[in-house]
Amino acid sequence: MRASSSPAAPAARRLPVAGPAVAVAVAVTAGHFINDAYSAMLTPLTPALQARYGVSIAAVTLLSSVYSLTSSVLQPLLGILGERIDRRYAAALGPLLTGVGLTLMGFVPWFGALVLLVAVAGFGSGFFHPAGAAYVAQYSPPDKRGLWASLFSAGGTAGMALGPVFAGVGLTHLPWFALIGVVIAALTFAVTPGGTQKARRVGLAEYAGIFRGPLVWLWGMAVLRSLASMGYNAMLPFMLLAKGFGAREVAVTLAVFAVASAAGGILGGRLSDRYGRTPVLRAAILASVPFFALLILSSPANWWFYPLTFLVGAAVNASIPVGVVTAQEYAPGHVAVASSIMMGFSWGFAGMLVFLVGALADATSPTTAALVSLSLLLPSAWIASRLPEPERTSFG
């Protein structure tokens, strides 16, 4: 059904849209920025960590798996826990734990301790994302909920683009960047209101009931879309290397893709406020398919490569914040858990499947593997076309 055009509920109209509401949104968006910047430091630092601790490549890549487990796959459970405690602690402690954990990676005495440190940092990120998204959802005006969610999402995307720059200072000087997380954590704690989302005790059966019906299909759509995007990013270095290009072109392409993702998310969020969540979901995914195929078959030797990279990055990622808001409106009584399902669990699940893309590349070619990954957008768009339009309900 179409989005409700009736006036917002009185409770929703009483939510402040300026002053405190904007301050909360800015604080958690800044937290999202620095949290994801810290997260993006891990992969570029793996060679330095391998040399520092004298371990194998397989061992050092385990760090990324551990971080993905605690920050993404377990995020729904952390979202449930976040509904039972004061949410401001989760929002403030997130960037603090992530920052301290990942900036001190070169200062623990042995590799086992490093694994534990990375796991704790991942828990910080896993706590933050559902809490931050819930604050944005509850303080945004219903007619601009998609826009506010997309700005929150863009903060994280911008942080991911900056993370490798932080990593460039090396393990020795990295702890200085922890101070940024400490300051933002303090500001977030000072600005965000306290209290839990629910006064009554919620049983596990009710939480299990969240992940059913349209939310399950929405999650499946997000997994397929995420795997398509991750598969392309994973194959990009190998495709460009085979065409005679190097690390510089790979870095520029990924940077353009990341900036476009932020811009596309903002546009998609605003369009969903005007035209509905599900029309934007299916249009953004389906429209990107032919351009994505052309991008995979192109290279920086073509004048259109970087403009096309921007177009594809914006289109395929325009649905990310829209999907988060759709999940929140499907489960308005559990916005933190719904957010974690879309932001953490879908990305984490897709991340665990990326190795299949690599295996296919070994058996065929990186270009073939990227095109097969791209084909996952078709069932993703089909699922989006069958999703019901959520009600624009107010959040308690």
Image (tube, rainbow, N blue to C red):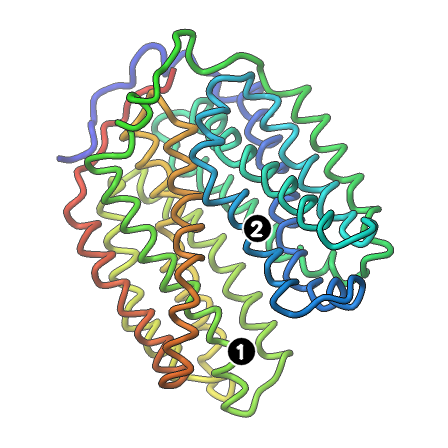
Q: Quadrant of the N terminus?
A: top left
Query: What crowding class fits label 1: few (fewer than 14 Cα within 10 Å), some (14-19), or many (20 or more)?
Result: many
Going 57% across and 14% down the picture, which residue do you hit?
Answer: 194
List the residue tagged with mark 1.
237
The answer to whether residue 287 is left or right of residue 320 is left
Q: Is residue 134 above or below residue 232?
A: above
Q: Quadrant of the C terminus?
A: top left
Query: What crowding class fits label 2: few (fewer than 14 Cα within 10 Å), some (14-19), or many (20 or more)?
Result: some
Q: Where residue 66 is drawn, which disc sits there?
A: 2
The answer to whether residue 211 is left or right of residue 235 is left
Q: Nearer the viewer, residue 84 or 89?
A: 84
Question: Which residue reaches farthest bottom?
Answer: 244
Going 21% across and 38% down the picture, which residue do you hit?
Answer: 214
Going 47% across and 22% down the picture, which residue do you hit?
Answer: 139
Q: Nearer the viewer, residue 117 or 129?
A: 117
Image quadrant assignment for residue 375: bottom left
- Tell me how far mark 2 sits from mark 1, CA to CA: 24 Å
Going 75% across and 40% down the picture, which residue do you hit?
Answer: 100
**Amino acid type indicated by mark 2:** Val
Image location (x, y in percent) of residue 296: 39, 78
Q: Is residue 139 above or below residue 254?
A: above
- Disc 2 vs disc 1: Cβ atoms closer than 8 Å? no
Q: Is residue 225 above or below residue 394?
A: below
